[in-house]
Amino acid sequence: MTTEFDALIAELRPAVYELSRDAGCGDPDNSTSPGAMFLTGTWDSWMEVRDQYDDREGMVMEVADGSVPIGTHLVWQTYVDLCAYREDIDDYRDRKEGTPTGDARTALYLIAERLVAHLEFEYLAVMAEQEYEDG
């Protein structure tokens, strides 16, 4: 059952292709593919918590971390769908896990982090402009 809030969120949510540009990754195959679900899920998570944190950087990292799929199959579907193999993860490679799937998760984390940071920057810019106009 869809609530009014869910309907409003769906109306406000940018298209998945706009989200992929904001995240600096490849475009998902379609609006219901694993990559698209990852991007829209990240956006939804950010929308839910964006006003609940004083530590904006901590919020960005927490939302990005929570957005990365857990299941191995879904990790790889999302990774391929968003062309995450283009990510340079050398400085971020998970040295504890050290597996290809761990590297894929790291790449997806970086994509989510970039998306949330971009959304947060845009949001704060709009809020600052509103404050300035309100005087």
Image (spheres, rainbow, N blue to C red):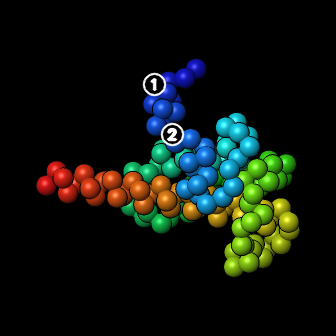
Question: What residue is drawn where x is 49% and y is 59%?
Answer: 118
Apparent side of residue 110 relative to residue 44 in the rendered image (left or right): right
Question: What residue is drawn where x is 56% and y is 48%?
Answer: 18
Question: Disc 1 or 2, which lies upstream in sequence?
Answer: 1
State the quadrant of the N terminus.
top right
According to the picture, the residue beneath numbered tag 2 turns out to be 13
x then y, percent, for residue 103: 79, 67
Q: Nearer the viewer, residue 22 or 117?
A: 22
Q: Which mark is residue 121?
A: none
State the quadrant of the C terminus.
bottom left
Q: Is residue 109 visible?
A: yes
Apparent side of residue 60 relative to residue 34 in the rendered image (left or right): left
Q: Would you identify the image quadrant in which residue 95 lies?
A: bottom right
Q: Secondary structure at mark 2?
A: loop
Question: What residue is drawn where x is 51% and y is 50%?
Answer: 46
Residue type beneath disc 2 = Arg
Q: Residues within 10 Å of mark 1 (few under 14, many from 20)?
A: few
Question: What residue is drawn where x is 68% and y is 50%?
Answer: 27
Cα separation, mark 1 vs mark 2, equals 14 Å
Q: Secondary structure at mark 1?
A: helix
Q: Residues within 10 Å of mark 2 (few under 14, many from 20)?
A: some
x then y, percent, for residue 3: 50, 24
Residue that extends furthest to the top in the rendered view of this protein = 1
Residue that extends furthest to the bottom in the rendered view of this protein = 91
Residue 77 vertical placement versus 116 (above, below)? above
Residue type beneath disc 1 = Glu
Tag count: 2
x then y, percent, for residue 132: 20, 57
Apparent side of residue 127 relative to residue 40 in the rendered image (left or right): left
Apparent side of residue 134 relative to residue 86 in the rendered image (left or right): left
According to the picture, the residue beneath numbered tag 1 turns out to be 4
Circles 1 and 2 in contact, beta carbons < 8 Å: no
